[in-house]
Image (cartoon, rainbow, N blue to C red):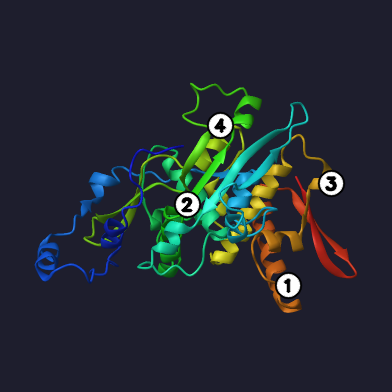
């Protein structure tokens, strides 16, 4: 979707985040005038209103989303970006319809690379996908402004502040910054035709947008604390595409509240498993596809397995998550499949 609003006002963003550096070329008079201007802070009631946490987590499940977040066949986002502006193509298979192709898929980090005032160590990764899903789950309800804490609450399924980690909330804010500066483009004309989507139902099938489009704002909470929030201009185009072609998986956020630590790695594993199981629940899925291969899981979640100990630790996390899902009646159970006395696969019983 093409947005008519200016997304990248770097200096405005840096000022809002408190990270702006004075330009060496500005004269002292301009500096004094600028510093004298009060920073705009909006009240919680004005921008958040009667905020209600979404009851459902919406997760795009398609090849395009996989590849933009480095979880697809095209490799890491950096490798995808290196393909140039011609990008790559995604084949959309259908048993009943002619194959369609999503063309000119492209991700660009130029703005991210230029944002030297923001300390971002890595580009888009698997954790960013989970932030993206939680963010979309909020804005798709019409609530266009949210805070990093609210996004984190959706990601963990926990509505209270008792289990919140300030570092984790900061990780969410950094993820928002990365996605704000990451441009994407793709052409899903053929997929729209395949799904008989007419021009009145969609704004554009030629997308040239950003992972998230909006601006950062300052919000004064009821307790007087000032936090940084994000105000979206619209629902992200990548989410709109997935929704239009029926590639959104939905789970109750209560499923996300588990008795495991909500580290970045654990959040990624938990949500990957939920997406896999949602795919398994489709009528078209047979028994052969109801198995999770641990090596594939670790690869998709971008987890490096260095030795047997790390393999065991991460396998134990997977088993703990599945035990939680079984206890919540989301699945009936699971079976560990061994090869040469080592657990290599897990069969899901629905």
Residue wearing tag 1: 311
Residue wearing tag 4: 244
Report the side of 141 relative to 313 (left or right).
left
* Quadrant in which residue 252 is drawn: top right
Q: Position of residue 239 (x, y in %)?
A: 52, 41
- Gap in Å between the C-alphas at discs 4 and 2? 23 Å
- Gap in Å between the C-alphas at discs 3 and 1? 24 Å
Q: Position of residue 16 (x, y in %)?
A: 27, 59
Q: What's the residue at 51%, 22% (across, down)?
A: 199
Q: What's the residue at 77%, 35% (across, down)?
A: 284
N-terminal label among 4 and 3: 4
N-terminal label among 2 and 3: 2
Q: Between 143 and 93, which is closer to the camera in this rendering?
A: 93
Viewer-nearest of labels 1 and 2?
1
Viewer-nearest of labels 4 and 2?
4
Q: Quadrant of the C terminus?
A: top right
**Are there few (<14), some (14-19), or many (20+) residues within 10 Å of tag 1?**
some
Residue wearing tag 2: 154
Q: Are marks 3 and 1 in contact (CB under 8 Å)?
A: no
Q: Are marks 2 and 3 in contact (CB under 8 Å)?
A: no
N-terminal label among 1 and 2: 2
Q: Position of residue 292 (x, y in %)?
A: 76, 55
Q: Between 218 and 112, which is closer to the camera in this rendering?
A: 112
Local secondary structure at mark 2: helix
Q: Are marks 1 and 2 in contact (CB under 8 Å)?
A: no
**Are there few (<14), some (14-19), or many (20+) residues within 10 Å of tag 3?**
few
Q: What's the residue at 33%, 45% (across, down)?
A: 6
**Are there few (<14), some (14-19), or many (20+) residues within 10 Å of tag 2?**
many
N-terminal label among 3 and 1: 3
Residue wearing tag 3: 288
């Amino acid at each position: 979707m093409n947005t008519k609003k200016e997304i990248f006002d770097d200096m405005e963003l840096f000022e809002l985040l408190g990270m702006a550096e004075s330009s060496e070329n500005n004269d002292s008079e301009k500096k004094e005038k600028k510093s004298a201007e009060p920073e705009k802070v909006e009240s919680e009631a004005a921008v958040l209103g009667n905020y209600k946490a979404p009851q459902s987590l919406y997760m795009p499940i398609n090849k395009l989303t996989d590849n933009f977040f480095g979880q697809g066949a095209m490799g890491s986002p950096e490798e995808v970006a290196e393909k140039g502006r011609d990008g790559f193509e995604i084949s959309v298979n259908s048993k009943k319809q002619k194959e369609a192709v999503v063309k000119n898929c492209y991700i660009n980090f130029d703005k991210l690379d230029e944002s030297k005032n923001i300390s971002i160590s890595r580009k888009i990764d698997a954790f960013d996908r989970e932030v993206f899903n939680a963010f979309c789950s909020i804005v798709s309800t019409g609530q266009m402004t949210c805070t990093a804490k609210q996004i984190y609450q959706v990601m963990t399924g926990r509505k209270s502040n008792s289990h919140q980690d300030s570092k984790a909330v900061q990780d969410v804010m950094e993820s928002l910054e990365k996605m704000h500066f990451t441009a994407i483009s793709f052409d899903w004309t053929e997929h729209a035709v395949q799904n008989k989507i007419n021009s009145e139902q969609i704004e554009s099938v030629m997308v040239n947008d950003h992972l998230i489009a909006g601006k950062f704002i300052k919000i004064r909470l009821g307790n007087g604390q000032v936090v940084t929030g994000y105000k979206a201009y619209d629902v992200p185009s990548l989410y709109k595409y997935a929704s239009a072609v029926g590639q959104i998986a939905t789970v109750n956020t209560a499923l996300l509240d588990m008795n495991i630590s909500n580290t970045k790695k654990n959040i990624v594993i938990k949500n990957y498993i939920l997406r896999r199981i949602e795919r398994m629940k489709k009528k078209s899925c047979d028994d052969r596809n109801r198995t999770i291969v641990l090596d594939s899981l670790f690869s998709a979640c971008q987890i490096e397995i260095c030795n047997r100990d790390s393999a065991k630790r991460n396998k134990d996390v997977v088993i703990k998550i599945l035990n939680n899902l079984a206890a919540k009646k989301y699945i009936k159970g699971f079976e560990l499949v061994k090869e040469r006395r080592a657990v290599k696969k897990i069969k899901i019983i629905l």
